Image (spheres, grey):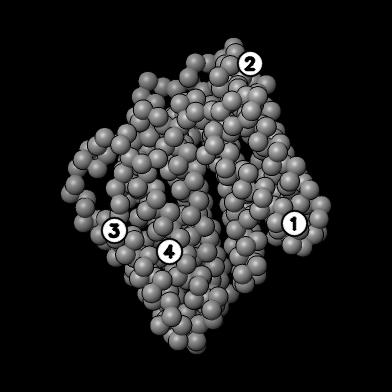
Amino acid sequence: MASTSAGLRRIVSRDGAERVTYVELFFDLVYVFAVTQLSHLLLGELDARGAFHTLLLLLAVWWAWIYTAWITNWFDPDNRIVRSMLLLCMLVSLVMAAVLPHAFGNRGLAFAGCFVGLQVGRSLFAVTALGSDPPLRRNFQRILTWAIAAGVLWLFGGDVHGSAREIIWLLAVCIEYFGPASGFYVPALGRSTTHDWTISGHHLAERCQAFILIALGESIVVTGATFAEKPMSATVVAALVVAFAGSVALWWLYFDRAADLGGSIIARDRDPGRLGRTAFTYFHLPMVAGIIVGAVGDELAIAHPTGHASMAALLTILAGPALFLAGHFLYKWAVFGRISWPRILAIAVLIIAGPPLRQTTPLAIALVATVIVIAVAAWDTRLAHVPLAELSSEPSRSPR
């Protein structure tokens, strides 16, 4: 990527391994708070409608964060103008996260305003700053058009109440998520291709790895905080150990080998923009959702480890790992072009085990879920003797 006259663009090093800057990591701290707000929202509304609200807001939060990660692929966060833009986005994100629990209540317009401000503001900045790069500038003009179209619905939905807000925001989310898949097609501006999205693969991979750590970190915080509030007993300690083991197993699945190798593959792929769109922009979302749902399940298991499990406890404890495994399956399929049968089997077992486990305790359910995830991690570890070059061979044939 050539630098512009304003010096705002990243200059990719010869090996393409762009480092994540300190200001990007500082920016991420707001999203630690946002993830915590989402898990607390789900915990406070453990029903179908609450799950739907949490899902819609997670889709918005993830979209706000991932778009910023893409922006910092093209613009240098160490440049003072770019850094100022990023810090302003951080402030708006903080307000958005603060009002998130009341987004479907009396602060819907505030949440929508913050989200739209982020989406439109970043694109306006890019269009203004890319005057000497017509192809990429045209790409951001298309993105800006889609952001404005969705933004109208976000703002309109924030000003109505009840089911009307839910329906309008669902439509807005659909527009947001269909944009990249359609190449942000605009009749007067044409369509972007993934070859236009000249990104640093290592950087985008590392940014998404950071968000997985954010979500896992929030899970650890929830586990520790819940344990601290409970009287010490053997069952509570056991629930804490099981929850911690489950978090370690998820970390192991993601970071043991596939994370670094995935970054290397996207960096040398002939079309890194396409792989970045599928494997990272879309397929990381189920993993984040799984960690958040699993954290709620861990909190319920630690708070009430004995006695018959509620339906909410059963669903969150089993659905969390299942969602994570589904997302990781899609990620590995996109990056390596291979189907992970152990993950499919594990998801099936988690689903089948639900009815029989309904009559057991939350601790027992959590133990079963954790053992299943550990089994998949152990299977991956058995493949450690396979050379990395063999696993990453011919990545261009991977389905995107």
Using the numbered discs, state the Cα–Cα distance from disc 3 to disc 1 in whole angstroms.
40 Å
Q: Is residue 206 visible?
A: no
In this figure, which residue is indicated by the disc labeled 2? 131
Mark 3 → mark 2, Cα distance in angstroms: 48 Å
Residues at marks 2 and 4, CA–CA distance in whole angstroms? 45 Å
- The answer to whether 314 appears left or right of 379 in the picture is right
Q: Are marks 1 and 2 in contact (CB under 8 Å)?
A: no
Please state the horizontal and vertical placement of residue 362, each as a whole percent of the image. Answer: 47, 79
Q: Secondary structure at mark 4?
A: helix
Q: Which mark is residue 341?
A: 3
Q: Which amino acid type corresponds to the residue marked 3 in the rendered image? A: Trp
Task: Give the residue at mark 4.
Answer: 322
**Which label sits in the foreground, 1 or 2?**
1
Query: Of tags 3 and 2, which is closer to the observer?
Result: 3
Percent of width and height locating residue 185: 59, 32
Image x and y of residue 166, in percent: 70, 58
Which of pointers 3 and 2 lies earlier in the amino acid sequence? 2
Q: Mark 3–mark 4 contact, CB under 8 Å?
A: no
Separation of residues labelled 1 and 2 (CA atoms): 38 Å
Question: Which residue is depicted at the point 73% across and 46% down?
Answer: 153
SS assignment at label 1: helix
Is 192 or 91 nearer to us in this picture?
A: 192
Q: Secondary structure at mark 2?
A: loop
Tell me which numbered mark, 2 or 4, is placed earlier along the sequence: 2
Q: CA distance from mark 3 to mark 4?
A: 14 Å
Q: Earlier in the sequence, mark 1 or mark 2?
A: 2
Mark 4: which amino acid?
Ala
Q: Which residue is mark 1?
A: 165
> Circle 3 — which element?
helix
Camera-side residue: 40 or 122?
A: 122
